[in-house]
Image (tube, rainbow, N blue to C red):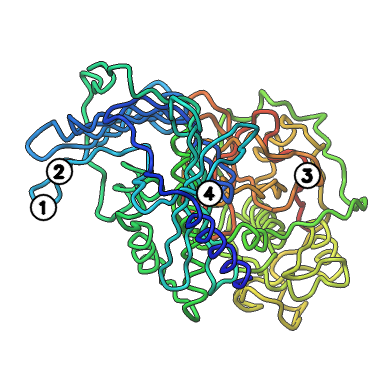
Amino acid sequence: MDIFKTLSILLLAGLAASLPAVSPPTFGSSYHARGNLKLPYAELDEPFEFYFDANNSRSHINFYHGLDHIYTRGDMYKYGTTLKISPETVDTSGKACFQINGTADAPVVTPQNALPDLTGFKFVGAVELNGQKVNKWVNITKVYSRSSTYTFYTTSSEPIVPVQYVMMGYDSLLGSHYDKYIVEYTFFDDHTPLKESDFAVPEGMKCRSFPGPGVEHHIVMNPLQEIINPEKGDRYEQLFDEYKNQFGKNYEDKKEHTQRLSHFRQNVRYIHSKNRQNLSYRLSINHLADQHKDELGMITGRLNSHEPNNGKPFDTSTLRLRDVPDTIDWRIAGAVTQVKDQAVCGSCWSFGSTGTIEGAYFLKYGKRVRLSQQNLVDCSWAYGNNGCDGGEEWRAYDWIMKNGGLQGEEEYGAYIGQNGKCHFNESLVVAKIKDYTNVTSGNQTELKIAIATKGPVAVGIDASHLSFAFYADGVYFEKDCGNTPDDLDHAVLAVGYGNYKGQDYWLVKNSWSTYWGNDGYVLMSLKDNNCGVATDATFVDLK
């Protein structure tokens, strides 16, 4: 692979040398531009609009058609200022303003540009791009094992305007591409004078500084610096150092460190971009941020064999929705044990099944008990579960019923996050199951009744989206979530329901530690049975 990379570089250099010297294009010191920022590895396509005025040291960028605004004003205050105005994350009726003022040591003097510095770019020639004849400029830089190819395209005839800017990064240490982004320019005008209103900060807003130390808020305030101006340095590396310290991350060697930094950069870009979309929920950097999306699939583990189970149908003939409360949270009553971390083990099914049994135990005996997930991971293989390689809640119930019960965590031993040797002792069981019940698939009314009258309910969800991996707070609604049985790849525990600012939600306990979500919990939208919470829900009755 390196040979082909070297040959391509030499070919470009040779081609450039054979062409007459052509100076890079220049553009006006003020302009209005629109376009899209595309991050293929994060599956993002983010529209932007730019107003740039170098003569007065100011710029104004808005993302997602005006949802998120960033003003860089070197002409305000003694050392300049940067302001970010965004919708309040889970309150679409309000706006929040954040402000970082320049200092004597770090003045705000240079507004963010939408165009790269073309110093060092070489003219390659006229090519065709998306059916359009364009001029192509290339700059290749190499730092240690990294080779970064920057390509800038302009129209080939007057007026000369930018068309596209592409960065492709290759790391010979990894033997793969570590980064790619594309800036497409759909509109550019550096002739029409800009108006004062293009840079006017909305009046009457009370701005506040970002809470806490760290470099992340500087990235949030200017997310395009590393993309448009890589020569200014990589703040993501500093943020990665902070991340490693916060979560105690250590890597085997330089290769893994480089790989984790690459994943981290892409995930942070994704998190920040999603937060600019004015969603009903917010994402944040958590302990999973150095993982590739394929690795994140290893911390789910719910299977779907399409086999009929031995559960009973839910008889609601004597139960009515109007007889149950409008909101319920079984944590308050004491029916829910602490959040655990299933680690890199597809054992979510054991957490969902033990969670609903723990709830039933509390309702029957008034005591909270911590049951053993490891007992099920180690021992229910003969019933179709596969330990850390996945399983189904109902198969766990069948094993418990057949073997006389389930041991507690204290009796069986702590969860170890991997398959172990079964050492089940029936004389030490804590909970015994009489039978289990299937809530009618897709029936959200039944699920509410089940939670209200039977306690926490084991449910399957579609957790395959990056937005779920980095959920922090708010009511989670993912437009791409599936809700068919085949979409459900993760087992969790529905411990309540309610309404937040007009949005109905399920209160769901996850098993990815308290670093994830809101102390390990997520509010999941009821809208259209999003992510399939009501598709495959079960609860148990104890002996």
Local secondary structure at mark 3: loop
Q: How many labels does the image show?
A: 4
Residue type beneath disc 2 = Gly
Location of the N terminus (image quadrant): bottom right
**Residue position marked by numbered label 2 in the rendering:** 102
Give the mark toward the camera: 2 or 3: 2
Q: Nearer the viewer, residue 112 or 219?
A: 112
- In the rendered image, residue 292, in percent from the top left (x then y), is placed at 59, 60
Report how far apart the C-alphas of labels 2 and 3 lie in the structure.
54 Å
Residue ID at (24%, 35%): 72
Local secondary structure at mark 2: loop
**Residue position marked by numbered label 4 in the rendering:** 521
* Few, some or many residues within 10 Å of mark 1 (<14, 14–19, 20+): few
Q: Which of marks 2 and 3 is nearer the N terminus?
A: 2
Q: Residue 536 carries which label?
A: 3
Give the mark toward the camera: 3 or 1: 1
Residue ID at (78%, 44%): 536
- In the rendered image, residue 69, in percent from the top left (x then y), is placed at 35, 29
* Few, some or many residues within 10 Å of mark 3 (<14, 14–19, 20+): many
